[in-house]
Image: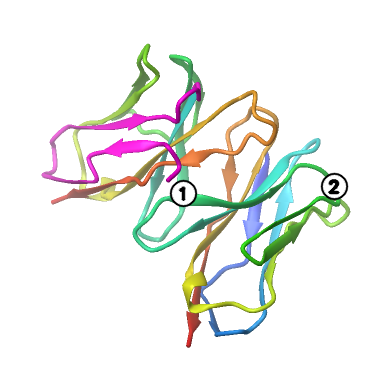
């Protein structure tokens, strides 16, 4: 079945460092791809999304490009802030099937 | 604010007990999903309802059940609780006609079983 594999954490970076969290997927057809973020003590929030190959999702300085040839949707940010400390989940949804989440990557940004 | 509400925010109970978690989806969303998030942060899909009918089942234990009511709110019932059921329980909703099919999550209910 469809699945998502994302980079294991935790990831610790200094403020203003470059962030990459890898995500690859296995799916039939053309799923929609998502990154969700979970701040401490809160529920998941949609960070960005992409629905077709070569689409780039972006929000709050984060970007991810839907790469069908490598079945990847890596999350990047050029300069992280302390406020970006959270758990990040990569997810896919194929049509009306249930959403499949990766295991989550905990990011800690130190001042 | 996602528009999805969950009550209660926290619940502390004892082993063997039964609890009910409640979720109200975003206005207009017909689908409701339940997830369990354990301490090691993994998200497990439990069950989905669409307009009152069960649509999909994930890793839901037989001790757990859910339903969606005519006003579209949903309840997750957990019975014969065990220590290992302590977790965050999230509800999400979506509009199947939406372009991207994203799910909107509630703030969660933290269940502690003592």
Secondary structure, mark 1, is strand
Mark 2 is surrounded, within 10 Å at the Cα level, by few (under 14), some (14 to 19) or many (20 or more) other residues, namely some
In the image, residue A35 lies at what x, y percent?
61, 54
Secondary structure, mark 2, is loop
- Closest to the observer: A55 or A7? A55
In the image, residue A54 lies at what x, y percent?
86, 52
Q: Is residue B52 left or right of residue A25?
A: left
Report the residue marked by disc 2. Answer: A53
Mark 1 is surrounded, within 10 Å at the Cα level, by few (under 14), some (14 to 19) or many (20 or more) other residues, namely many
Q: Splitting the image into 4 quarters, where does residue B82 fall?
A: top left
Report the residue marked by disc 1. Answer: B43
- What scheme was used to colour the molecule? rainbow
Residue at the image position 70 percent from the left and 32 percent from the top: B99
In the image, residue B83 lies at what x, y percent?
21, 49
Q: Is A19 in the magenta?
A: no
C-alpha distance separating marks 2 and 1:
26 Å
Q: Is residue A51 shown above or below B38? A: above
Q: Is residue B67 left or right of residue B82?
A: right
Tell me the chain of label 1. Answer: B
In the image, residue A39 lies at what x, y percent?
43, 62
Q: Is residue B56 shown above or below A88? A: above
Q: Is residue B29 left or right of residue A53?
A: left
Badge number at residue A72: none
Q: Is residue A45 shown above or below A27? A: below
Residue at the image position 50 percent from the left and 21 percent from the top: B30
Q: Quadrant of the N terminus of chain A?
A: top right
The furthest residue to the right? A69
Q: What stretch of residues is rendered in magenta? A: B1-30
């Amino acid at each position: 079945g469809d699945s998502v594999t994302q980079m294991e954490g935790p990831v610790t970076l200094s403020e203003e460092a470059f962030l990459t969290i890898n995500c690859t997927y296995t799916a039939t057809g053309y799923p929609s791809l998502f990154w969700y973020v979970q701040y401490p003590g809160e529920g998941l929030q949609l960070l960005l999304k992409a629905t077709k190959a070569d689409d780039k999702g972006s929000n709050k300085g984060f970007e991810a490009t839907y790469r069908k040839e490598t079945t990847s949707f890596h999350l990047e940010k050029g300069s992280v802030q302390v406020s970006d400390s959270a758990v990040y989940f990569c997810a896919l949804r194929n049509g009306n099937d249930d959403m499949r989440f990766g295991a989550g990557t905990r990011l800690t940004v130190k001042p | 604010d996602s528009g999805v509400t969950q009550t209660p925010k926290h619940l502390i109970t004892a082993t063997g007990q039964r609890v009910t978690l409640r979720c109200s989806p975003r206005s207009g969303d017909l689908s409701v999903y339940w997830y369990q998030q354990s301490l090691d942060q993994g998200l497990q899909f439990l069950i989905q309802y669409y307009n009152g009918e069960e649509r999909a089942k994930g890793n839901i234990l037989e001790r757990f059940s859910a339903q969606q009511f005519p006003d579209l709110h949903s309840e997750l019932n957990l019975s014969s609780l065990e220590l290992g059921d302590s977790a965050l329980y999230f509800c999400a909703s979506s509009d199947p006609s939406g372009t991207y099919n994203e799910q909107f999550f509630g703030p969660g209910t933290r269940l502690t079983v003592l």
